[in-house]
Amino acid sequence: MANPNKPFNDLAGVPAPDLDFKDPDILIASIATSQAIGSLNTILGADKQNITHSLNLMSPLYVPEAVASSGIENIITTNERIYQAKILEAGEIKPHEKEVMRYTAALIFGFKELVEKDFLATNQYIAIQKTLEPTKSGIRKLPGTQLKNPHTGVVYYTPPEGEGLIRELLSNYEKYFNEKAPEHEIFGRAAVLHYQFEAIHPFHDGNGRTGRMLIPLYLSKQRALHLPLLFVSKFILENRDDYYLLLRNVTYKGEWKPWVLYILKALEKQAKYTLKVLQKIHDFQQELEEKLEKLVGHAYARDIAKLLYLNPYFVQKDFESGLKVAYVTARKYLAILEKEQVIVKKKQPKRNRFLYVCPEYIKLLKNA
């Protein structure tokens, strides 16, 4: 077993020893997870021929995941602030907000790589982490990394040391990640892979966010999830003490089953939650399009609805370019939408311009 104060250079590779995927409790939980994700897939329906379009349509929903995943690492901000930050000048965005915004870019990069190559290997893991942490990128080369309790300073884990060993462990990890898994093992393997990545802890920073991001990417690789839109960060943030306790119990006690059941529960619960959010957004979009047709006519209704969906906060220039209309036409339609309270205009602090927001849509996204 590992010694918290010494590098865990004896970390075993995957598959996990002493873990039975046919354990009745794991099988029952896997079936429940599979059913929940199957229902989610019915509404995701990825178009493989136009994956960029599919990802862009889902991009507003990456923000709550980025905020939650960063929150686990005590990088604190809000969904609303990140939506607004997308239309601010670089100098107006705080460093921790930029860090959260890079999460979306890293996730989209990872999925595009997966679609193009049909695998994700060490080079892709490094590139994902570099997107998250451009100034702290790459495999750890120097010794001395230890994970400590931030309040007491007590070391609770020292990951493996030495670039060669880390790359060897990642090579083993990527083989398990990319091989075809038996159907009944897919979701359990996702739990094993997440533990393994966190235990390897290959980078100086960004390990937790990269590891959590790899969960939906793995499910997509195994064709169990159409789009990487199933995130466990919200569940973990709400059950963070259990998360870290169960991780450590695998390391120090070899207790795999409780850990696997925890991740299976997280996947099942978040699949059901995400499905509800998507259904609400779908219903809202339909109602919005119908309302817009009455207000602005059929020609612009769908384009405006799409613009509002992709840009929870926007400025007039976004509206002009999104609809390919002139200033005067944009002002005309914005005035109509304001009058009917489809959008609300807000003065941007310290700037001589206004932000526009669709308040009903923001309410949905705040709950995402």
Image (cartoon, rainbow, N blue to C red):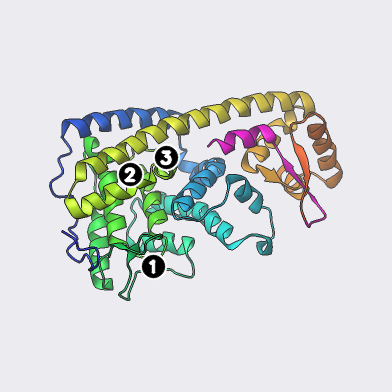
In the rendered image, residue 54 lying in the magenta stretch gets the answer no
* Vertical order, 99 against 111 (above or below): below
Numbered disc 3: secondary structure: loop
Q: Quadrant of residue 40?
A: top left
> What residue sits 29% from the left and 45% below the top?
190
Numbered disc 2: secondary structure: helix
Q: Quadrant of residue 284?
A: top right
Q: What is the three-letter code of the residue carrying label 2?
A: Asp
Q: Earlier in the sequence, mark 2 or mark 3?
A: 3
Q: In this figure, which residue is indicated by the disc labeled 1?
A: 204
In the rendered image, residue 357 lying in the magenta stretch gets the answer yes
Q: Looking at the rendering, in which quadrant would you find the N terminus?
A: bottom left
Q: Earlier in the sequence, mark 1 or mark 2?
A: 1
From where the camera sits, is residue 218 visible?
no
From where the camera sits, is residue 150 visible?
yes
Q: In this figure, which residue is indicated by the disc labeled 2?
A: 242
Left or right, 316 with respect to 281, comes to right
> What residue sits 57% from the left and 43% below the top?
60
Left or right, 300 with respect to 339, comes to left
Q: What is the three-letter code of the residue carrying label 3?
A: Leu
Expressed as whole percent of the image width and height from the top left, the position of residue 225 reads 38, 38
Q: In this figure, which residue is indicated by the disc labeled 3?
A: 230
The residue stretch that appears in magenta = 350-368
